[in-house]
Image (cartoon, rainbow, N blue to C red):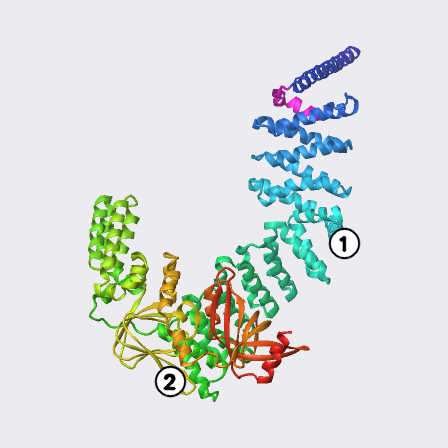
Amino acid sequence: MDIDQKQKEQALQKAKELMAEGETQRAHVRLSRQLEEFELGNSKVLLHDEFVGNISQLIIEASHDGPPGRAENLVEGLGKYACGEEAAFRERAVMALSLCSGLLSADENYQLLEKVTFILAHWLKVETAYYPVCETVCRQLQQNGLRMLDEGRWQQFDSLLDILFQIQSGVLEKGNVIRGLVARTLDALAADHILEELTLVFLKGQGGRQVLAEKILAHLGRRSVIFLLEKLLLSQKKEERLHLIKLIPEAGKVAVPVLKEYLSKDLPWYGVRNIVLLIAVMGDSSLIPLLLPSLKNVDIRVQQQVIDCINDLGGVDKKKYLLSALSLVDDELKPPLVVQLGQLGCSAECAEVLLDLLADREAIAANVREDLLGQLCIALRLAPKQRTVILLRQLVAEREKQGRSGRDSVSLIARRTLQILEPQLQPVAKQGVDKEVDVSFASDSEAEQRARLNLRDLETQIQQLLKAEKIKEVTALITEHALHAAKEKDFVTAEILRDRMLAVNPNALIEVIRVSEVIEEEKSSAISSHHLSLWSELYDFLDSDSFTALYHCQRFQEYKAEEVIVRQGDINSTLYFINAGMVGLTCRQGQKEIFLKRMKPGDIVGVGPFFDVSVWTVTLTAMSAVKVQILEREDFLKLLLQYPGLETRLSDFCRRSDKIPELLKMSGENRREDVRHSAQQIIVNSLLDGQDNPSQQRFKGQVEDLSLGGLSLMIRLSKKENARLLLGRRIMSSLPMGTDAVLECKGEIIGVSLQDYMDKDYRVHVRFDQPMGADDLKNLLLQWHK
């Protein structure tokens, strides 16, 4: 019985072995058939688990014993489906390739493995969905990438890295999971020994190898940035630091969190400065807020570097950042900051910051107080506010009380600024008999506020109609009130209502055009016939639209008999149109007051200071009750945006009847009384600070003529309004006398005139504080004419 049982078990085992062998043979037949179908282009075999699980082994066998090229063809076939359009085939093909990558690595078939690696990298580049196999693929790319680096095959690795970098940096759009996997892959690739070798080649190598090292370091992600930044912070060689400062920003956005983290650390001043330099090189203005806390750094070199970065990257927010800096940095850095803010235009917010600084002047460091006060006084010339005038008067009075006699440079600059601002703050004239004085214009901000206040009840009606969706009725209501306001010469209200109508009903173009036409007609009729008769020549010289716009841009002013309108030496870019009364023109010559001419209605005064850049060379005094229209330069510039050719036409008209230069010549008065000698010499000039010392603002110019008491020179400026900022500035001119000797002459800029419109050349007129000696003048002219 036992023998029979044993025979049965052996027979059963033999049957199982025969069945298994049969199944293996059948499986081999099926795989062979599926492989043939795959090679013939039947992609459906990828849906069979048996085929996907075994094709990697078939590829290994083909690489050993199969026909030449068969293994490569099978890999390429899988690659085609991995990057194809069918999602189901893509996932199955990538699974097969990933299995193949593992077997090829174990088989040490690196040539075919590299082909599989780049197919997997390309799949990762084009794939839009996430599959579980992604994590395995990234790990395999990491392993094969490290092998390439260890073998020194940087060119091949760079091609792989380029795809990973594009995914990590966002150039290729991927989901957060894939980007996270790629970021971890880059971290693993950035091994310390690899970074050390790459950095050494980058800093010491040359040729193509060095270029490759630079590119790989820039693309290896966060760990590479940290490694390079640590290298930068520890480096004692300037050339090395410069190379690293250029390289790190090439890593792109991945560097930003690292730089932010390091800025929060307790770094030495040079470490912070180097990070500021890095952000400047990155060229992204959105990163500036990261640097603002460094404005509080105790080291002035760091503060200066942040300011330089703001100047390089600030863009539209530059003024805002510089204003922030002004309240944080060391006093020594504030004078040039104030100059920059003045050049950017002194807005209301900027003016208040500058005025606060002026009001707290005793807290300014003594070594820069004079310079800073002088620059504040100049920058505030663009801030016509009562507070400005009050603080400047206090400053002048304070310095006189200190026994400075009001002749120090700060007092001189403050007085000049007062001369510029006070005329702008004179009260608007009282109502006269002419109806045009009662007309309100859109440039009047107070009138606009009053108009909006008066429209509150109408706005309530408009809102009620809009809630009821009665667009037609609300359009008719606004049109009616706009037309009524225009006919009542209330152009502010009319224009507000016209804009409101377009906002509530963009299709009401016919109504908007109708209201606009009525506004323009009423504006023209607002100008009295007497005014048109008085200024008929100007009306004929300009077109009617320009004349009307010019009229609306002016303000009316009245002066009593013997009241001074403008004084000789004032800096006041204003054009006066005399409507009624008589105005006397006088000038000083030494201690004498010389009468030049009596100006009558229809005359225009102020051509030079308005169109050129110069101080007033005459004094205007009302000889009787006088009515004038005043055209401010700032308002005129706004008008030119709508009428760009108006300045040329108005200037031509005014200069035809401007007799002041001729009258001054006849009277013998000249801003430079000494004989002028022609000269051609390049010299260096320095603007003086509040302590009357040369500042860092230097410029070259070519002397055109020279006298005992002054000179004129040609300089190049980007725009005319910058020339106005020079007017009244203190200056020191360095006049070369040969053999390295230099004669330094201090003086004041009293005029800046445009000489060449195309090249933006300006002639600057300087009056010396003290006349030079006759011998010095002779020696200079002899030296310069050699």
Residue drawn at the location 57% of the way across and 63% of the way down: 308
Query: Which marked residue is nearer to the observer: mark 2 or mark 1?
Result: 2
Residue 248, position as x, y percentages in the image = 65, 53
- Residue kind at label 1, given as amino acid type: Lys
Image: 479 above or below 621: above
| Residue 444 falls within the magenta-colored stretch | no
Which dot marks residue 204? 1
| Residue 46 falls within the magenta-colored stretch | yes
Q: Report the side of 432 relative to 585 (left or right).
A: left
Residue 206, position as x, y percentages in the image = 76, 50
Callout 2 secondary element:
strand
Which dot marks residue 593? 2
Callout 1 secondary element:
helix
Camera-side residue: 214 or 688?
688
Tell me the magenta residue range.
Answer: 41-56
Camera-side residue: 681 or 612?
681
Crowdedness near tag 1: few (<14), some (14–19) or many (≥20) residues, C-alpha within 10 Å: few
How many marks overall? 2
